[in-house]
């Protein structure tokens, strides 16, 4: 976790929770979308890629995507989503006080 970025850390927690609750039939789509969204934050230097990968794998174990469809599918979706997201890093505008 990169310290000092509450927005990115909350995004990681939220995406992981949503993915963990996703039911069969939508798990791989949601995994790819979550990986893309978080990949944008990795590309912007706001999250650590290894931590994101670990969180997504854990969520896929909770929703049983990992067990039902296999490690290869899960890791492939994570990789493609992260790479696509990193290619389009997110910019966060700071609020003026």
Image (cartoon, rainbow, N blue to C red):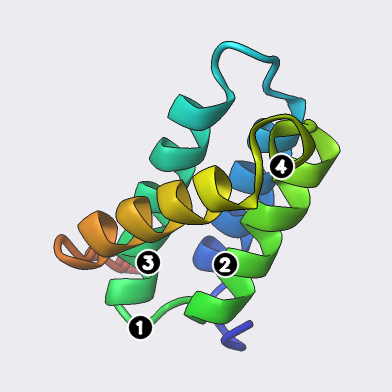
| C-alpha separation, residue under disc 3 versus residue under disc 4 | 24 Å
- The numbered dot on residue 66 is 4
| C-alpha separation, residue under disc 2 versus residue under disc 3 | 10 Å
At mark 2, the secondary structure is helix
| C-alpha separation, residue under disc 4 versus residue under disc 1 | 27 Å
| C-alpha separation, residue under disc 1 versus residue under disc 2 | 12 Å
Q: Nearer the viewer, residue 46 or 36?
A: 36
- N-terminal label among 4 and 1: 1
Q: Residue at x 66, y 42 (%)?
A: 70
Vertical placement of residue 23 versus 74, above or below: above
Quarter holding residue 90: bottom left
Residue picked out by circle 2: 52
| C-alpha separation, residue under disc 3 versus residue under disc 1 | 6 Å
Q: Are marks 2 and 3 in contact (CB under 8 Å)?
A: yes
Left or right: 18 in relation to 2: right
Quarter holding residue 87: bottom left
Q: Nearer the viewer, mark 1 or mark 2?
A: 2
Residue picked out by circle 1: 45
In the rendered image, which quarter contains the C terminus?
Answer: bottom left
Q: Nearer the viewer, mark 2 or mark 4?
A: 4
Q: Nearer the viewer, residue 4 or 46?
A: 46
Vertical placement of residue 78 versus 64, above or below: below
Q: Residues within 10 Å of mark 1 (few under 14, many from 20)?
A: some
Vertical placement of residue 79 versus 3, above or below: above
Residue 37, percent from left and from top: 38, 49
- N-terminal label among 3 and 4: 3
Residue picked out by circle 3: 41
Extreme residue toward the top, this view: 25
Q: Nearer the viewer, mark 3 or mark 4?
A: 4
Q: Residue at x 71, y 42 (%)?
A: 66
- N-terminal label among 1 and 2: 1
């Amino acid at each position: 976790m990169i310290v000092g970025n509450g927005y990115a850390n909350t995004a990681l927690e939220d995406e992981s929770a949503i993915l963990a609750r996703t039911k069969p039939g939508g798990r791989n789509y949601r995994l790819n979308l979550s990986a893309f969204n978080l990949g944008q934050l990795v590309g912007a230097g706001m999250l650590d890629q290894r931590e994101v990968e670990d969180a997504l794998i854990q969520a896929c174990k909770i929703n049983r995507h990992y067990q039902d469809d296999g490690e290869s599918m899960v890791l492939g979706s994570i990789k493609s989503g992260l790479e696509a997201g990193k290619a389009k890093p997110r910019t966060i505008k700071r609020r003026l006080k």
